[in-house]
Image (cartoon, grey):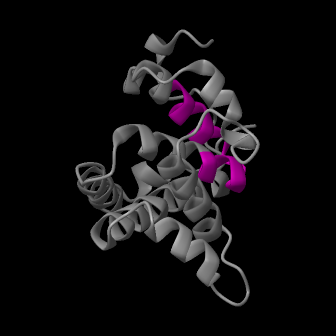
Amino acid sequence: MSQRVNAFAQSPELFKKFVEFGMLVKSGSIEESILNLVDIRASQLNGCAFCLDMHVKQAKIRGERELRLHHVAIWRESTLFSPRERAALAWTEVMTHLPAHGVPDEIYERVRTQYSEKELTELSFAIMVINGWNRLNVGFQTVPGSADKAYGLDKANLN
């Protein structure tokens, strides 16, 4: 795989604003550990190799257990996730692959038992951000691991 276009070099102002938006979302009320799971799950669903590689490494650096990282793909069957984490993963899936007839009430109600309206809104924005990054990196074939040194991800020791 070789990168097609460096979208960030081609549109630096848009890149800067999108990074700022992402940082604002990350500074909200949702726990960092849940945001890590959201980033990983959306990246799995979208087939974004660059983002999946990056977010697994970030989560490990931030103290996430390796077995939980392996279990994100099978979160429904795994006993390693709390009800709040499960709700975030369900919301990530439904907001990443929107059903033809909208988000089912059952999923919305399940998520609402775990998140306030403000938290649910912030969680939704977090899902929007990672889906945006996924689309850029999948479309332009950003090479996984190509920014490890720049982002300090070599510290994850997952080479």
Q: Which x, y percent locates residue 104?
A: 65, 82
> Where 118 falls versus 85 (above or below)?
below
**Taking 152 as reference, is 137 left or right?**
right
Answer with the quarter of the image where residue 151 lies.
top left
Q: Which x, y percent locates residue 94?
A: 63, 69
Residue 6 in view in this figure: no
Q: Which x, y percent locates residue 96?
A: 62, 66
Prevailing secondary structure class for the magenta stretch in the rendered image: helix
Q: Quadrant of the N terminus?
A: top right
Q: Which x, y percent locates residue 15?
A: 35, 56
Q: Quadrant of the C terminus?
A: top right
Residue at screen point 44% across, 70% down: 112
> Where 67 falls versus 125 (above or below)?
above
> Where 145 falls versus 1 (above or below)?
above
Residue at screen point 50% across, 66% down: 111
Answer with the quarter of the image where residue 22 lies.
bottom left
Magenta-drawn segment: 41-57
